Image: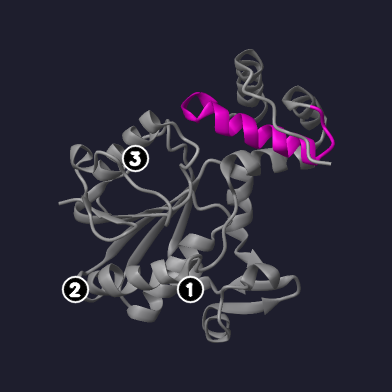
Amino acid sequence: MFTPVPELDVVAYDRMARDVVSLLGIDLSQYKPAQVWRRVNCFASARGLSDPDALVARARGDATLKQAFLDMLTINVSEFFRNPEAWEALVVQYLKPMLTSQLSVRIWSAGCSLGYEPFTIAMLAREIAPTTPVQILATDLDETILSRARKANYTEQQMAGVSPARRARFFRRVDAGWEVKPEVQALVTWRRHDLLKDPYEKSFDIICCRNVVIYFTEAAKTELYKRFCDALRPGGLLFLGATESIPNIRAIGLQPNGLTFYRRP
């Protein structure tokens, strides 16, 4: 039977936000309360829990539930070559010209989750320019997810977006499924990073941040995009998700360059 999501209870939400900081280390103050409230209540209900208070209480003593709760809040859902048409546009319009004209290319995968995005970038880079130096910084808020990404192991189901030719070139068979080959792993550096709090490195050619900030407040997004702009080199590219856009883009300092691409002039 369908259970309607309760209206936002500001007092209960504030209590949940304090509990989430204590339990998961995530500050919800720059997330959209109504959307987070809905997601958390749906998540709790799906697990037979009456409300966020019950969810938090159960998660304190249940490591599996705690990790699932964290994954839900940090949106750790992705796959290799997600939205292939966007990756094709990136390759043709931006990545290939960079790799064939520059001495090296530096890319940041912000909110990398299990590593699908940085390894997708690494595979594309090696297909275009097998010897051009490429540095890929892969960051995420969730250290547990990062530890899994560093292992570079994927199940058959997780490999759905990878063609047979790419499997043969960039992966090797292991008992549990597939492992990214060492020469591809070597292109990626992993680091825990909080987009809302931590300093940003500079001089990136490309920053990928796709479907990561959709639940942030508009003020938080504006600040984030300004910081991304500052982190790009002049002429650098910001690559967002298909449903994401940047309001007041001129004030931020970026220029639209297609549906999901934004350049720093």
Residue for point 82% across, 35% down = 62
Q: Quadrant of the N terminus?
A: top right
Gap in Å between the C-alphas at discs 2 and 3?
A: 26 Å
Q: Quadrant of residue 11?
A: top right
Callout 1 secondary element: helix
- Where residue 179 appears, x then y in whole percent? 62, 71
Q: What's the distance in space between the residues labelled 1 and 2, CA to CA? A: 22 Å
Lower position in the chain sequence, tag 2 or tag 3: 2
Figure label count = 3
On the rendered structure, is 85 left or right of 265? right
Which residue position holds label 1?
183
Query: What residue is shown with label 3?
Result: 200
Res 50 → quadrant: top right
Q: Residues within 10 Å of mark 1 (few under 14, many from 20)?
A: few
Return the disc, 1 or 2, that comes first in the chain's sequence. Answer: 2
The stretch of residues the image draws in magenta is: 28-50
Residue pointed to by mark 2: 101
Tell whether 145 sits left or right of 197: right
Amino acid, disc 1: Glu
Location of residue 60 (image quadrant):
top right
Earlier sequence position, callout 1 versus callout 3: 1
